[in-house]
Image (tube, rainbow, N blue to C red):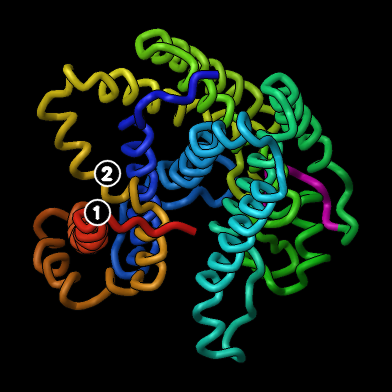
Amino acid sequence: METTRERLLSLDVLRGLTVAGMILVNSAAGINGRAEVFPTLLHSHWQGLTLADVVFPAFLMMVGVSIPAALGRARDESGFDAAQRSKIFWRTVRLFLLGFILSNLWWMADFKAIDWRLFGVLQRIGLAYGAAATLFFLCGPRVRLAILAAILLLYWPLTLIPSPDGLATDLWIRGHNFVGAVDRILLGNHLYVKGPEGYDPEGLLGTLPAIAHCLIGVAIGEYLLANPLRRASGRLAIAGAAMLVAGIGWGFVFPVVKDIWSSSFVLVTCGIATLALALLHFWLDAPAERGAGAKLLAILALPFGINAIGAYVLHEVTANMVGWDLLTAPFEATRGTIGDQLASLIPILLYMAFIWAAMLWLRGRKWIVKI
């Protein structure tokens, strides 16, 4: 497989857009109690899909896309030796531990106020990365495709196993499934969603389709490295459309639910992300054809994409800033004129500009936060 191709701008831009999207929707949720925000910026209560539901899975797919470029040469030269096993293992551990810290900042401040939570966004990314990177070394492309297909197909009946805690199984009702029951039994009260129907949206069994999600990204990354620009863009678009159609169709019987990372959710969100990547690949990865719009997009997205972990961590520790009076004053001044939904974007965009400026500063000094 050819691995010498120059770094693709489309990958960093899409990664940046997904990180910016995660900050956008998290900030919208944070300000939602104070103002009415656009519904598409909030996660679905259960089944269904909004913009907020798309950004995290798009980032997870991009983690997989990056694996062949990052590890391809090492696999070809030394295979899955002790050094590579150690590298993947410790990166997985670091991501999980960093995610655990970020998920439990409030608990660390006051043990009695809330329960700690084991899982979260970076924990899921770490586990999916570790599994996908290991399979990248151990298995060929066809075997990996067979594994991800088996995971997606078998996950459906797994969710339908009767709940050991006696809650009636119904995939269309929040928490009424085997995936949630396993979280309740094994994690106790250390969950994101509390109560007798509680579960963790980044919980135990949902990690399995997340691994398949990452493996789809690995397949896309291998294809991009091995194929010319124009042909790759068109075929990526076809693959993205096929996944999107298949996921929508499957969703009529296996609902599209982010909180259990349903197989139909994997296909729909990977389809959307692949279509976006195909468009960006066609538009951005031919330097002679980049216009003003492409350059502006790169300026806005690259600071987030090149320092994705840094941007996400900074956001997690400064998330309360979006509610500061300094940022909400323009919202209060304009809500009566333009309405809450538009006015609520002002503090959110100001906060995102702060994160962007910090990442631009790091980029200017060629500092990249790596885990």
* 297 drawn magenta: no
Point out which mark residue 302 bears: 2
Magenta region, residue range:
167-174
Q: In the rendered structure, which amino acid carries the disc numbered 1?
A: Arg
Q: How far across and how far down the image is residue 279, in percent? A: 33, 21
Q: Nearer the viewer, residue 44 or 157?
A: 157
Q: Are marks 1 and 2 in contact (CB under 8 Å)?
A: yes
Please identify the residue farthest to the front as the structure is shown.
77
Q: Image check: 24 left or right of 313?
A: left
Magenta part, dominant SS: loop
Q: In the rendered structure, which amino acid carries the disc numbered 2?
A: Leu
Please identify the residue farthest to the top as the structure is shown.
231
Point out which mark residue 363 bears: 1
Residue at 14%, 72% in the rendered image:
329
Above or below, 207 against 296 in this view is: below
Number of marks in picture: 2
Residue at 61%, 46% in the rendered image:
129
Point out which mark residue 148 bears: none
Q: Image check: 123 left or right of 142?
A: left
Residue at 76%, 44% in the rendered image:
170
Q: How far across and how far down the image is residue 103, in percent? A: 54, 70
Q: Image check: 340 left or right of 177?
A: left
Above or below, 191 against 168 in this view is: below
* 171 drawn magenta: yes
Q: For residue 175, what is the image quadrant?
A: bottom right
Tell which tag, 1 or 2, sits nearer the viewer.
1
Q: Nearer the viewer, residue 310 or 355?
A: 310
Q: How far across and how far down the image is residue 104, in percent? A: 55, 75
Residue at 36%, 32% in the rendered image:
7
